Image (cartoon, coloured by chain):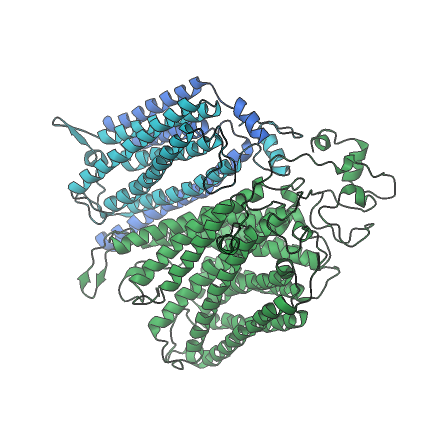
Amino acid sequence: MEETKKKEETSTHKIGIYLWIWGLLFVLSFFSYMVDWYAFQGLLRWSLILIFMFLKAGLIMAFFMHLFWERYALVNVLLWPMTAIACFIVLMVAEGQYTVFTRLLYFFTGG
Amino acid sequence: MSDEYNQQNTPLEAQSSETMSGSSGTPSKDIDYVRPAEIPEQDLYHGHSFITKWVFCQDAKIIGVQYFLTAVFTGVVGLILSWLMRLQLGYPELVPFITAEHYYQFVTMHGMIMVVYFLTALFLGGFGNYLIPLMVGARDMVFPYVNMISFWMFFIAVCVLMASFFVPGGPTGAGWTLYPPQAILPGTPGANMGIILMLISLSLFVIGFTMGGLNYIITILQARTRGMTLMRMPLTIWGIFTATALAMLAFPALLVSCIMMTLDKLLETSFFMPSILQAGEVLSYEGGSPVLFQHLFWFFGHPEVYIVALPAFGIVSDLISVHARKNIFGYRMMVWAIVGIGGLSFFVWAHHMYVSGMNPWFGFFFATTTLIIAVPTALKVYNWIITLFKANIRMNTVMLFCLGFIVTFVNGGITGIFLGNVAVDIPLSDTYFVIAHFHMVMGIAPLMVIMGAVYHWFPLVTGRMLSEKLGKWHFWFTFLGAYSIYFPMHYLGFIGVPRRYFEMYDSPYVTSAVGMNEFITLAALIVGFSQLIFIYNIVTSLKIGKPAGKNPWKANSLEWLTPDVPPTHGNWGEKLPVIYRWPYDFNVPGAKEDYITQTTPPSEVINAEVEKT
Amino acid sequence: MSDVKIEGFELKPGFKGMAEDTGSDQTMFKGVQWGKVMMWIFLLSDTFVFSCFLISYMKGRASTVVDWPNTSEVFSLHVGSVPVPLLLIAIMTFVLITSSGTMALAVKYGYEKNRKMCGWLILATAIGGLTFVGMQVFEWSKLIHEGVRPWENPFGAKQFGSYFFMITGFHGFHVSIGVIFLFIYAYKTFAGHFDKEKRGWFTTMKGGYVEIEILGLYWHFVDLVWVFIFAFFYLW
């Protein structure tokens, strides 16, 4: 337990950084709410939503969950599996479009 | 370790890291230096009563045996189901109670039991629990309580699964892939209670397994003993570790699909259910996507194949190395192959779905990734064979099973290449060729490893040897028998006999397939019964087997080096072992014996040409 | 964290450090406690659960030929007589992010052995979580009142109701579990269990303030998932 004790004494961060991140999260949430308020449409809406979402998620993970201060071994173990999810998402986008295409073709226009 | 790292160029270190020949190096304390322990000693809960010692036990070894026995029980149920199926196929209408409905229920339950509740639980729960702490030099799993809960969750899952045999309507008969919409619609056997119990049981299995899997991963990553680097771990541990990592990432997809299908059944949501006209009546479902279930299922299902295969790869590598008295060829290549197969397995899932009506462009992507994954797999096969080349092979039962594994695995792997190509797969899909392929590659091949592993580690668990004579009979019956079952199935597939058909009736297949079907059924019955030799061997050897003593196979890895044989709770007595090398130092030139255990310090093998690991 | 010290092992930063950590004996994640690794790996697995839910939602929504309801109308609240889009959701997001901030501070004060401050902050987090669950109940009852059910939806595609109740329900379930544990840990902190290194219920391992960080990881994860649900379900 000696390591732990040593660590506990030294590993806290200044309160400022938490308050900063906290504030940023509020601002970003407000922005993403504004996207809906002003009813942006199309590509602008989607890209803004995604940008704010990833920024918020990144801030929470990096600072609140301390990933920014963790050693790379842990960070990499946690982030690499997400490639499988990314692949799944991309393929399901294609699959969804194909499904709706076949449905429209066979149910409505009559293939 | 830091000394070793910082002063890598000191002459002494250079000598111990290269080969040492002649008598130039004097035994010195410095070359035996291993840096001190990072983590404090683990406090263990020692059971006092019968209940805490043997039932709700927190010792990973006991939990491993519990997992093993429960899994074997489900495996026997699966075996009996396969007999019933074979009886129907070989001799239609011979057994009066096998109706079409029952036949589908047997097919479904056989598949699900064998893949999930038997092989997965046996490799990861059984071998994983028993071997991980011993092989990495830990006192126990890192969270013994969670580990105990994990087994009991699995036990409840098995109970729920078995309960589905006794509910009205019987177990589900939707095929082990449980494809909706058919799985939850009336007309499919067990479409009410059967499918619900199956989904609940799978969810419980996933929850229980997650608890176990966290234990395996963290024990391997964070609780190794001094000197045990990742690249000094036996390949068994690498296989189990990667398989567990896959399971942690793949089972969520199964959990999600189970939850969604349960909601479709109970609340009539339409996740997977399109508009359906049934017996002239429009059902309330509308607009769901059945192919989504297939994607979710195979996003779990394909890694699941490797969850079964990777521990088998790992274990067989160790068995071959020990019984061929030679280091495993290309250890690092083997490790990277295991990791690579594991990583790639998340990108190949839809090769199970070429005929499902998914986006047709996917065929390119998944055929390519599927063929890529064959590369590391082939590497492993070459390495096993090169390990055997010019080795000092002990032709005992364990080695026979390893050789049997290589043969069946190569056979099944090559048919896999056929099926991975879209154009070849389409005519072959849903025929007996597929059955032959996956039974060879993930049925018989892992079973060969399990049996070899039991012959190998039985002396460790019980302190007594199994009978070699009975073992060889068992091997030849199993191997030749299994080949007689599955090899003809390739031919059945080529002539177009479809899988999952209750009966062939008067189709043109009948004339050429009848005789072969009878032959396969007879072989299946013989193979099944020949397992009684195995059980007899185990039961009698418990009492009258030759006492094994310490390290009967002269192996190097840590599990044989415990102070007590069989190992007791806490594994290592007073002091944890310190590791100086990999577990494959067999027949090292200049060494006193033909093996150097992992705990032998460098100063004791100063004249041997050991490799730096 | 970066300033761990380990006897006989030099910790290097960056990818070189990663290579050496991975190649070293005993542990791969240097100075990270077992429980914390367990929570991280569990969260990784849980991420896959939520990803699969959201991917299914995406696939379901992309392939339906019936129109998806306009979420900013469905989830709007009337202030006076003016409909404000997503008002409740905005408040819920605000509450959850607030509770995430208090949790982060609780972890900090925990490591500084500031028992009182840590306890109060955990309690504040728990209350924030409870508020969130309460508002979710309100949101659900409002939608149910309007006729949305898992199996039907008066505003358009059937799958809207199904995915909404399933995904927010699964998230709400996570929040509820978190709230229960937050209350338990607030009690444990005030009672001084972590200062005394008291052993937990089912474990022979010693307690410590690292447990607060582990709980914090879970709580931030719940917040993280909400960020994605907010973006994909309410805004998209």
The x, y position of residue B208, in whole percent, is 44, 50
From the viewer's side, name the closer residue of B377 and C190.
C190
| Tint of chain B | green
* Chain with cyan colouring: C
Residue in view at x 44 percent, y 39 percent? C43
Residue in view at x 23 percent, y 26 percent? A37
The x, y position of residue B420, in whole percent, is 49, 57
**Which quadrant is home to the N terminus of chain B?**
top right
- Please tell me whether residue B5 is drawn above or below residue B583 in the rendered image: above
- Tell me if residue B382 can be seen: no
| Tint of chain A | blue
From the viewer's side, name the closer residue of A17 and B356.
A17
The x, y position of residue B141, in whole percent, is 55, 46
**Which quadrant is home to the C terminus of chain B?**
top right
- Please tell me whether residue B403 is drawn above or below residue B146 in the rendered image: below
- Please tell me whether residue C100 is drawn above or below residue B542 in the rendered image: above
